[in-house]
Amino acid sequence: ILGKTIEDEEFDVCSFLEIGKDGGYIEESGLGSFSWTHDQIQQAAYDLIPPTQRESFHYQLGQMLLENSTNCEMKRDALFFIVDNMNKGVDLKLDRNQKTQLAGLNLQAGNIAISTSRFHAAAEYLQTGISLLIKDSWIQQYDLTIQLYDAALEAFYTAGQFSKFDAAVKQPLTHAMCFEDKLNSYHNLVRYLTASGKSEEALETCLFVLKKLGVEISPNANAESLLTEAISVKEIIRNSHIHNLLDLPKMEDFDKMAAMTFLNTAVLCSYETNEFTFFFVICRMVKLSVRHGLCSISAVAFSLYGALLTCPTLSDFDEAYKMGRLALMAIDRLNAFRMKPNVFLSFYGAIAHCKEPVQASIPKLLEGYEVAFALGDMERVTGILQLYAAVAVWGCGDKLTKAEEIIRIHFRRMLQHKQDISCKNILPHLNQVAKLTGSKENVYVTFFNTTEDNFFEEEMNRRGAHTRKLILHTCRMYLAVMCGDMESAAREYERNGAKYQGGIRFFGTTTRVFLAGIVGFYLARKRRLDEKKWAQVGEISMDTIKSWTQDSSWNYAHKLLLLEAECLFLKGEEHEHIAAAKYNESIALAKKHKFKNEEGLASQKAAMFHLEYNRKEEALSHLKHAKACYECWGA
């Protein structure tokens, strides 16, 4: 820096550094670099510059270094040093050319900061760049202006600076010269609306943009039209052959590629607001990929289509798994690293557990989370953390203490990025784990200064928020079942029972179905006037899990045995011995397959069964075993 900024040709940098070293002011830190020996020495040297000249000093320092730096150096840390110094002179009377130059430098710095996941720094650089634009920049400096706003909106959104985002987004949407130049702004606007809990408005915006791009999706889709669409997609894939899909040509049409971006963005907001539109979005992504060529988002399309095939109306788990595996291959084949969180979300959330041990998904979900966070993909950060919490706790993928630590760390991380709405989807999981581990902390008070009951009522009365409501119900129901409070569990089922069987088979769905079976058979025994109603709830769940067991006995065989035991318990004494054997088989299989939580639950249920027949020693033995299982789990 000294060599490039001192104009006196007779000044000897090496001699100066030696004098500084001898005087104890500076020290060599290796590889030709030097630092002040103490911050106070640096401050004392800086204080020699008169305060009225410091802005000018920093600006000139940056300008001189800029003039003497190579392009290669400008791509490294030199750029940030230059821009940081020149930005300290923004209040100087800079002329138009100087402002334009500095705005461009801030754009470069902002883009590099975004690419290295330094979103708060990027937001600051880009805000400074925008402040340097001249009054009629949309006319006189159009390219610089649109690029600054495009980059700034991404940085503001990812850094959680929503007030700045709200103020800035109107500019490009109003002044951009063509619809194509508004696409980045619309894309970030949809992300912002979704993160702000305005999923319906986000979906409307997506459908508006897609229509402009030539892809029309009716907001009034129904089950019949969806089935027709799904069958047509299945036929298209059959004709193309799954193993040949990755050999399709590359997508070249700009409008089609832009449409894929908005379809991918529409996935989350449509899932929250309109299930049929959500399914149509997935089908259109696949159709565009097959008919117009592949792009990086095609990997997401294939994984989502695989997830769609797990729905009860389609239930083609073999095809779902093939599509999911194809999507994982597509990440490398299509150079789709940025799509890894999206693919992992659908594959490890909805497909893998249909065939593979669910515990194996844990490291992949955490890998996907870290990639999403580094990319600033806060939507997938939320989704993957939700799935981790579900698999880690309900699927016994981690001990509770470890699960709580991981959830809490990443929950706070999201709060730092102002993802408050998304954090509300994680809060019930955190509360559930805290209660299971015996913590006295009220996480609702800690993080949102409210009570659990107030939070629950507020969210239940909120329009939309489909995912959050399901998470709340499932967490409360799970906690009630594990604690033996079956009446509370029944209330949760009755509030939202219709949602327990349908939709994509995310791991939370399988947990709800299992819990519904446990609750159904229990209440059929306890509420004899409603025995038929509750027995039917249990039998539907048992039949569903039986069908799942055919594809993944590891994840579901012990659950099926426990439900069969509960069903036989309901039927009475003539089935007593078979029921006892089923309980024991369920306990043994849960242990073998590392579901310590459900080993404990099966032991607990077996104890209640033996107690009913006054076999107190057997009951006590099972209760002791249940206690040991829960302690090992961390509960």
Image (tube, rainbow, N blue to C red):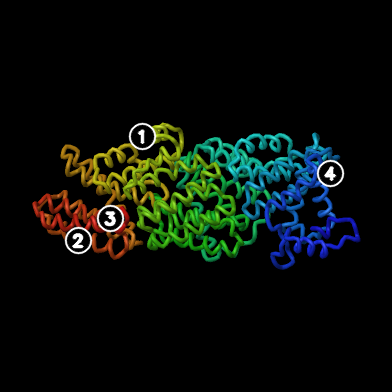
Secondary structure of residue under mark 1: helix
Residue type (three-letter) at the residue carrying disc 3: Tyr
* Residue occupying the point 20% across, 42% down: 532
Disc 3 and disc 2 in contact, CB within 8 angstroms:
no
Where 591 falls versus 121 (above or below)? below
Where residue 55 sits in the image (x, y, percent)?
A: 79, 42
Label 2 or label 1, whichever comes before in sequence order: 1
Which disc is residue 630 wearing?
3
Label 3 or label 2, whichever comes before in sequence order: 2
Which disc is residue 633 wearing?
none
Secondary structure of residue under mark 3: helix
Q: CA distance from mark 2 to mark 1?
A: 38 Å
Where residue 416 sits in the image (x, y, percent)?
A: 54, 44
Secondary structure of residue under mark 2: helix
Where residue 275 sits in the image (x, y, percent)?
A: 46, 42
Which residue reaches farthest bottom? 31
Q: Is residue 634 visible?
A: yes
Q: CA distance from mark 3 to mark 4?
A: 68 Å
Which disc is residue 98 wearing?
4
Where 610 falls versus 480 (above or below)? below
Residue type (three-letter) at the residue carrying disc 4: Gln
Label 4 or label 1, whichever comes before in sequence order: 4
Q: Which residue is mark 2?
A: 584
Q: CA distance from mark 4 to mark 1?
A: 58 Å
Q: CA distance from mark 4 to mark 2?
A: 80 Å
Disc 4 and disc 2 in contact, CB within 8 angstroms:
no
Q: Nearer the viewer, residue 290 or 409?
A: 409
Q: Nearer the viewer, residue 435 or 111?
A: 435
Where 12 falls versus 205 (above or below)? below
Residue type (three-letter) at the residue carrying disc 2: Asn
Residue type (three-letter) at the residue carrying disc 1: Asp
Which residue reaches farthest front? 23
